[in-house]
Amino acid sequence: MLKWIQVLWPSFMVAFVATVFFFTVVNPQELYLLGDPVEYSPIATYSIGFFGFWVVCAASSLISIYLEPPSKRGS
Amino acid sequence: MADPANKPSPDKAAQGSDSNPDTLYASRKKLQVRSTSGVFTNWRWAMVWLTQILYYGLPWLTWNDRQAVLFHLTERKFYIFGWVFWPQDVFYLAILLIISAYALFFFTAIAGRLWCGYTCPQTVYTEIFMWIEEKIEGDHNKRRKLDAAPMDARKFMLRGAKFGAWAIFSLWTGFTLVAYFSPVEELLQALTTFGFGPWETFWILFYAGFTYVFAGLLREQVCKYMCPYARFQGVMFDPDTLVVTYDEFRGEPRGTRKKGVDPKTVGKGDCIDCGICVQVCPTGIDIRQGLQYECIGCGACIDACDQVMDKMSYPRGLIRYSTENALKKRWGMKEILVHVARPRTLIYGGLLVAICIAMVVGLATRTDLRVDILRDRATLAREVEGGLIENVYRLQVINMIEEARNVTISVSGLDGIHLDSDGLAALPAATTESVTVQVRVPYDAAEPGVHQIVFEVVVDDDPSVVVREGTTFIIPR
Ligand code: SF4
Ligand code: SF4
């Protein structure tokens, strides 16, 4: 449980900030996905963007706790 | 109230697990917090009402025939009463964040975790959830008994009612959150048919789930283990910061005694060791052990202890807002207040005021017209009849207010430079208009090469609103 929270929670916070920042600067209507303009509704684009950031950040957190020195690692 | 809860020990067991990081979330002892009444409890409830009336109420207000506060994601516009903010205004958002940060520093330096104790959504929703819990399952003693009881029809009913009430409240909270981003009218229509869009449904449920888990289940653990501010706030404290403090000099040695006994005659301090301050603490700590990072400064223990002191006919304030220095040097309220003004608070306060002024000035002088110039890359420069050189530009003119306006575009910077058209453009309310203009210059006006020119866009009805934007004009060789 602790590990899950350690991975998911910090990444959630960072993903939130990153999403706000990214979509303030970039208009999703001007994005291209694999060469084609993005055609999802804006709310879908923002949401997918958020989850994308979350996954990336969670991956980083995951590696962080994986690489933690064994003495500090729990159970 | 002769019950085992009179001893603080069960709550202390909760702290014991803190030393082992692996059991942080798993083996936490569930707290059944005793409710309080008193000055700080009233303040806390006042803030619950204030913040939640704002939160649940704002999406329902209208202004200029639209939702008063709407962060319209689809249109990429933020409506806040009379203002419309565009992505170009991100600067104001940044300033707002800086103001929030400094306000947090400032208030924390003066009186500790005021934010945590009174306004943080975590506190506010926990307060509301605990209120619901108490109404359905009874006070902390009844709840503890219920926790221990085996599942039977009554327990099942009570649990069902509580979880159901929490769920309804959470769903409403989730709905409200989405109403800040999608027009509430559309949402309301969708609500009658349950025809929300997939992502709206998702976010309503997501935030509802968040509220439910954080305020219903995790509670003080969010503050203890998940909140960055809780870890960070220590550095903003100093010995003159007002925090909830147990007056050790007055209270110790603690111990039970009969009502009406003068503590001095029995060689004791004022603390009767009733443990009520521990029972009311939403984070389950014993404030008598000194300032701890878990303490969210809610003041519940102050209210609780004051009531005990009243009953014993001792002066109030055995637990009170005080500072480290005040306790050590036995200062009174006057000296404490004198020390509120100290370099740290003055600097934070000064910066806060300065940034707020900058924000107000910025908003007051903000031009509500914006122009971005894009060159037409396809036709860089060409010669047209009459010995003229022509460059083509696309002007993105943003009319930031909710009023249609006419503007006149003109250009300067080279001899004989002029537009091919009359430069008039009509801008609908709060929209971005794309205007293509041909700029012409006599062939011999300047050397071949790149020249600076300036576009000027003036509002016809109000010539004080004018935007100048520079760009380049190319004369081919
Ligand atoms: S510790 Fe964090 S979550 Fe808890 S009340 Fe304070 S700011 Fe809110
Ligand atoms: S110790 Fe007192 S002020 Fe601190 S969290 Fe507990 S009840 Fe609130």
Image (tube, rainbow, N blue to C red):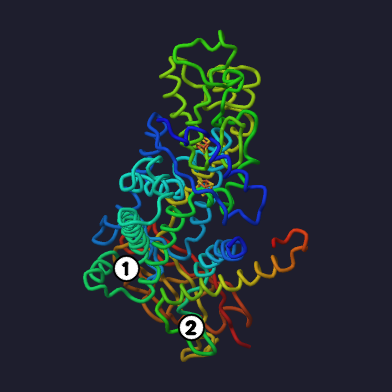
Q: Quadrant of the C terminus of chain A?
A: bottom right
**How many marks are shown on the rendered structure?**
2
Foreground residue among B192 and B469: B192
Q: Work out which residue is located at the far top of the displayed protein and give it.
A: B265
**Mark 1 Cβ and ligand 1 under 8 Å apart:** no
Q: Position of residue B113 (x, y in %)?
A: 53, 39
Q: Residue at x 38, y 56 (%)?
A: B151
Mark sitting on residue B406: 1
- Amino acid on which the number 2 mark rests in the picture: Val
Foreground residue among B285 and B320: B285
As helix, strand or loop, the secondary structure at mark 2 comes to strand
Foreground residue among B465 and A63: A63
Q: Position of residue B361 (x, y in %)?
A: 46, 47
Q: Position of residue B152 (x, y in %)?
A: 34, 56
In the displayed structure image, the side of residue B407 where residue B273 appears, left or right: right
Q: Position of residue B65 (x, y in %)?
A: 23, 61
Q: In terms of image quadrants, where is residue B75?
A: bottom left
